[in-house]
Image (cartoon, grey):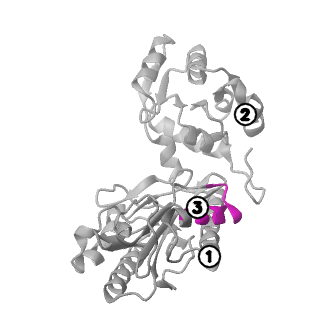
């Protein structure tokens, strides 16, 4: 099993048990899981080829008919990471799992229709197993929204690596006029590795000057200059879990407009954080933050949703946006990241990763959000 940096392991059997309850509610006898992230969540397996059949029979027999498939490259790995399940070794792992389900006369088999291709689905039907395949999208993702204690520990560690990496970059003078966006991005990434990151969450965004007005700018050889906003959006991965944080700095003395837009985004971000409560519709959280920016007359310059879930993937459910659906639950990990972007001039985004709690969210990213001037 996968252990974290403290030696703890997740309760994969409990996660599969929770999934079985969803299968019963959805009227299927088993779920064919082919999304590798979902397989990792349910078993701890991290290989690049796998399929999993989770049976929904009663708890006395369900684990006996729950089986993972992978190919010969991962024979040793699957035995080490998933010692509690039967493993089938076959290059065409999903086909082998479907074959077994047919031999066991499972009946109605749900499949991840948001992941399975048309050709893969056709292949399942062509096996003529007598199974009834039922589109069952998003069931594991529904479970993944609420993080257990193990997952929050990993998120805290990932956020700490991001905080420490940024602090190291600033202490070394890595953010200064004359450097390029690419140089800053690479140094920040290396600093996160030095402080415990196993990988980076995504391609680090470093956007200086007019580039800071581009929400997802990719680093270039653009040179940082005095008077620029510099936007850094970055994250670290620890134990498979992703952090996400954005901070915007000013190189040299800020102008009045820079102070004003920074203060506006900071106020909008505070409003969004304070709206994170169990039972609150995600669209209301977006609205709380967006209203601050709209009241200042800059609503059209906030061009994206307020945030998103984060965990084994950098973007998970729920989406916090005008069009977002559902309500927040205790234990959901999300970002809050409003931004205001003036094309051709510059922009500001401030982002934290937080966990929804009764009484107020738990903040995981601790770098100061005060306007920071870098000389």
What residue is shown at x 45% (from left), y 32% (from top)? 27
Q: Quick check: marks 1 and 2 in contact, CB under 8 Å?
A: no
Mark 3, residue position: 186
Give SS at disc 3. helix
**Does residue 157 appear anywhere in the picture?**
no
Question: Mark 3 vs mark 1: which is more N-terminal?
Answer: 1
The rendered magenta stretch, by its main secondary structure, is classed as: helix
- Residue 251 lies, in percent from the top left, at 46, 81
What residue is shown at x 53% (from left), y 41% (from top)? 21
| Front-most of residues 181 and 212 | 181
Question: Mark 3 vs mark 2: which is more N-terminal?
Answer: 2
Find out whether residue 19 is within the magenta segment: no
What residue is shown at x 52% (from left), y 86% (from top)? 375
**Does residue 22 appear anywhere in the picture?**
yes
Residue stretch in magenta: 185-199
Mark 1, residue position: 167
Q: Which mark is residue 78?
A: 2
| Quadrant assignment for the N terminus | top right
For this view, does 218 lie left or right of residue 183? left
Mark 3 vs mark 2: in front: 3
Q: Residues within 10 Å of mark 2 (few under 14, many from 20)?
A: many
Q: CA distance from mark 1 to mark 2?
A: 38 Å
Q: Which mark is residue 76?
A: none
When the figure is inspected, residue 97 is found, relative to residue 171, above or below; the finding is above
- Residue 202 lies, in percent from the top left, at 52, 54
Mark 1 vs mark 2: in front: 1
Among the 4 quarters of the image, the one containing residue 122: top left
Q: Residues within 10 Å of mark 1 (few under 14, many from 20)?
A: some
Q: CA distance from mark 3 to mark 2?
A: 34 Å
Find out whether residue 188 is within the magenta segment: yes
- Residue 136 lies, in percent from the top left, at 43, 34
């Amino acid at each position: 099993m996968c252990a974290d940096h403290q030696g703890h392991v997740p309760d994969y059997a409990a996660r599969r048990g929770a999934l079985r309850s969803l299968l019963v509610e959805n009227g299927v006898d088993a779920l064919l899981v082919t999304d590798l992230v979902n397989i990792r969540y349910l078993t701890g397996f991290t290989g690049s080829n796998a399929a999993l059949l989770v049976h929904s029979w009663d708890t006395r027999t369900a684990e006996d008919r729950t089986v993972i498939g992978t190919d010969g490259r991962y024979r040793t790995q699957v035995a080490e990471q998933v010692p509690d399940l039967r493993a089938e070794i076959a290059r065409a792992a999903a086909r082998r799992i479907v074959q077994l389900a047919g031999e066991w006369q499972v009946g109605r088999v749900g499949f991840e229709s948001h992941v399975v291709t048309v050709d893969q689905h056709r292949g399942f039907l062509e096996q003529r197993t007598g199974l009834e395949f039922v589109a069952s999208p998003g069931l594991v993702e529904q479970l993944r929204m609420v993080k257990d204690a193990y997952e929050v520990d990993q998120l805290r560690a990932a956020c700490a690596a991001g905080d420490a990496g940024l602090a190291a970059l600033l202490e070394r003078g890595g953010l200064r006029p004359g450097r390029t966006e690419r140089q800053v991005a690479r140094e920040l990434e290396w600093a996160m590795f030095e402080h415990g990151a196993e990988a980076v969450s995504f391609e680090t965004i470093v956007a200086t000057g007019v580039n800071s007005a581009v929400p997802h700018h990719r680093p270039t050889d653009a040179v940082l200059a005095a008077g620029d906003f510099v936007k850094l959006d970055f994250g670290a991965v620890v134990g498979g879990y992703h952090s996400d944080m954005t901070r915007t700095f000013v190189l040299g003395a800020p102008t009045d407009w820079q102070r004003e837009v920074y203060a506006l985004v900071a106020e909008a971000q505070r409003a969004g954080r304070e709206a994170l409560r169990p039972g609150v519709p995600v669209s209301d959280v977006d609205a709380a933050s967006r209203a601050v920016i709209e009241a200042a007359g800059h609503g059209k310059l906030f061009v994206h949703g307020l945030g998103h879930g984060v965990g084994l993937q950098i973007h998970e459910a729920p989406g916090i946006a005008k069009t977002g659906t559902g309500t927040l639950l205790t234990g959901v990990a999300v970002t809050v990241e409003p931004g205001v972007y003036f094309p051709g001039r510059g922009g500001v985004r401030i982002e934290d990763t937080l966990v929804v709690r009764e009484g107020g969210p738990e903040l995981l990213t601790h770098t100061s959000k005060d306007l920071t001037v870098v000389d």
